Image (tube, rainbow, N blue to C red):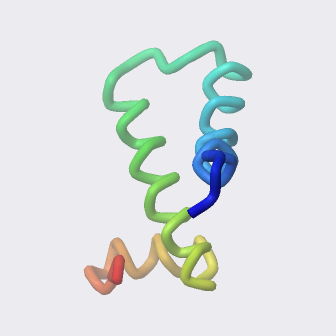
Amino acid sequence: MPATNNISEREIRPSVVFRKVTNGFRSDWGAQIHAGYRSVTGTARLGGQPALQAIRDLIGGKFACA
């Protein structure tokens, strides 16, 4: 087990930058949409799948996290 949490910090960094650049989320649903999008695309990236294909699979009901 690594002694630091650098992997976790690298995973959330794009969301932090997005939030700072756009001056925060104006609504709760906007934050939830962004979090869901990052979750789906991040999971797909870890599995070697393109983000667009993961979103298509999610819409089509074929997205699998395992």
Q: Quadrant of the C terminus?
A: bottom left
Q: Is residue 17 above or below residue 7?
A: above
Q: Is residue 28 left or right of residue 54?
A: left
Residue 42: image x %, image y %?
55, 63
Q: Position of residue 52 (x, y in %)?
A: 58, 73
> Is 31 placed left or right of 5 in the picture?
left
Task: Please identify the quarter of the rendering in which residue 56 is found.
Answer: bottom left
> Residue at point 67% right, 39% down?
13
Q: Quadrant of residue 31?
A: top left
Q: Which of 3/10 is in front?
A: 3
Residue 20 relative to residue 24: left or right: right
Q: Is residue 5 above or below residue 21?
A: below
Instruction: Report the residue at 65% width, 46% height from top.
Output: 4
Does residue 64 lie above or below 10 as drawn? below
* Residue in the image at 67% along x and 32% along y: 18
Residue 63, x across and y down, in percent: 35, 80
Location of residue 45 (image quadrant):
bottom right
Could you tell me how many numbered marks the image carries? 0
Which quarter of the rendering shows the N terminus?
bottom right
Q: Residue furthest left?
A: 61
Residue 32 lies, with reference to residue 49, above or below; the image says above
Front residue (pair 65, 51): 65
Q: Nearer the viewer, residue 27 or 7?
A: 7
Judge from the rendering whether residue 40 lies leftward or rightward of residue 41; answer left or right.
left
